[in-house]
Amino acid sequence: MKKALFTWIVKLIAVIILVQTLYFKFTGAEESVYIFTKLGIEPFGRIGSGIVELIASILILIPRTTLLGALLGAGTMLGAIFSHVFVLGIDVKNDGGELFILAIITLLCCTVLIIQNRNKIQDLLRFKI
C-alpha cells in the first residue's frame, strides 16, 4: 500500500511539472521563446519538446506504459538540464533557477519510476509493452 502511494505521488509530481510547462510552450510565452531562440531551435524545438512532454505525461499515468513515459521524460529532462548547464545558464531571465530545479526534480521522479519498472525493460525492448 505504501509503495503504491509513493509511486503515485512520484508520478503526479513528474506529470504536474511536465504539464504545467506545456501552457508556456504552446502559447509562445516570452520566456519559452527566449529559451528556444537561444538554443537555436525556435519554434520547432519548443513545440516538439512540448509534444514529447505531453506524450510522456500520458504514458507515465498509464501503469502499463509508465516505463516508456518515464524514459521519455528523463530524456527530455536530461536535454533541458544540459541546455541549462552548457548554453542557458542556471538562472534564465531572473527565474532564480526555478526551471533548472524543476527539470532536476522531474528527472529524479522519472529515474525512480524507471528503477521501479526496470523488470519491464526487456519487454520494452521486445515491443511487448
Image (spheres, rainbow, N blue to C red):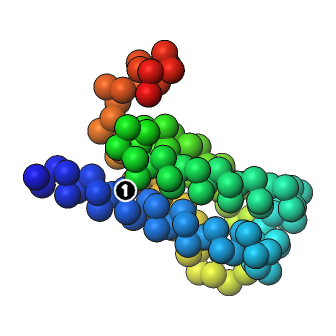
Q: Position of residue 120 (x, y in %)?
A: 36, 26
Residue at figure coordinates x 31%, y 25% from the top left: 119
Q: Position of residue 49 (x, y in %)?
A: 70, 54
Q: Is residue 92 above or below residue 84?
A: below
Q: Position of residue 35 (x, y in %)?
A: 78, 68
Instruction: Identify the image quadrant of the C terminus.
Output: top left
Residue at figure coordinates x 19%, y 51% from the top left: 4
- Could you tell me the amino acid type at mark 1? Lys
Residue at figure coordinates x 80%, y 55% from the top left: 45
Between 61 and 93, the one lying in front of the other is 61
Quadrant of the rendered image containing residue 105:
bottom left
Between 46 and 127, the one lying in front of the other is 127
Q: Position of residue 42 (x, y in %)?
A: 87, 61
Q: Is residue 111 above or below residue 21?
A: above
**Residue bearing mark 1:** 11
Q: Is residue 85 above or below residue 68?
A: below
Residue 44 visible in the picture? yes
Helix, strand or loop for disc 1: helix
- Residue reaching furthest top? 126
Residue at figure coordinates x 86%, y 62% from the top left: 43
Q: Is residue 19 above or below residue 106?
A: below
